[in-house]
Image (cartoon, rainbow, N blue to C red):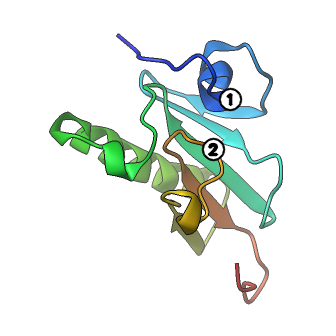
Amino acid sequence: MVIMQADCIFCDIVLGKRSAEVIKQTGGLVVFKDIKPKAPIHLLIIPKKHVKSIIELVGEDRELVSDMVYMAKDMAEEQGLQGYRLSINVGREGGQVVDHLHLHLLGGWNTSQPDL
């Protein structure tokens, strides 16, 4: 059973109520392009289950986080990225804008990456 939150933009994307450029879906994850990219390739990897942030993770979520990282690795390979950055922002002070756990995959810089 996938748990959703009514007022969550990312839950709406999972449910198909809000449009997004979805790249890939699995049983537990959705990958889509960031609408305000900070890199030539900027993908978001989210769990279908609503988890507000890393702070709310519980023991049963260990596999979920691992799946997110492996999905990032697979997506980087599919996008032809030789190097990339993975980032999870936690809380407002950490730069988290949407209250739904998400992993940023950023890459595609030609030689050097800018400070983010």
Tell me where residue 23 appears, x and y as whole percent. Answer: 68, 35
In the image, residue 30 sits, relative to residue 87, either above or below, namely above
Quadrant location of residue 113?
Answer: bottom right
Q: Dividing the image into 4 quarters, which one contains the C terminus?
A: bottom right
Q: Position of residue 93 (x, y in %)?
A: 56, 66
Q: Amino acid at mark 1?
A: Ile
Depth check: give the residue in front, 83 or 37.
Answer: 37
Q: Which residue is mark 2?
A: 98
Dots 1, 2 in contact, CB < 8 A: yes
Q: Earlier in the sequence, mark 1 or mark 2?
A: 1
Q: Quadrant of residue 37?
A: bottom right
Residue with the most extreme bottom position: 112
Residue drawn at (65%, 51%) of the image: 97
The amino acid marked with disc number 2 is Val
Q: Residues within 10 Å of mark 2 (few under 14, many from 20)?
A: some
Instruction: Give the quadrant of residue 8.
Output: top right
Position of residue 44 in the picture relative to residue 50 (left or right)? right
Q: Is residue 27 above or below residue 112?
A: above
Label 1: element kind: helix
Q: Specify the farthest residue to the front.
A: 93
Q: Which is nearer the eye, 115 or 79?
A: 115
Label 2 SS: loop
Local crowd size for mark 1, using a 10 Å CA cut-off: few (<14), some (14–19), many (≥20): some
Residue 109, compared with residue 53, is above or below; it is: below
Compared with 95, 2 (above or below) is above
Kindly give the residue lying farthest to the top in the view shown.
Answer: 1
Name the residue carrying label 1.
9
From the image, which quarter does the N terminus lie in? top left
Find the distance from the CA under tag 1 to the CA under tag 2: 8 Å
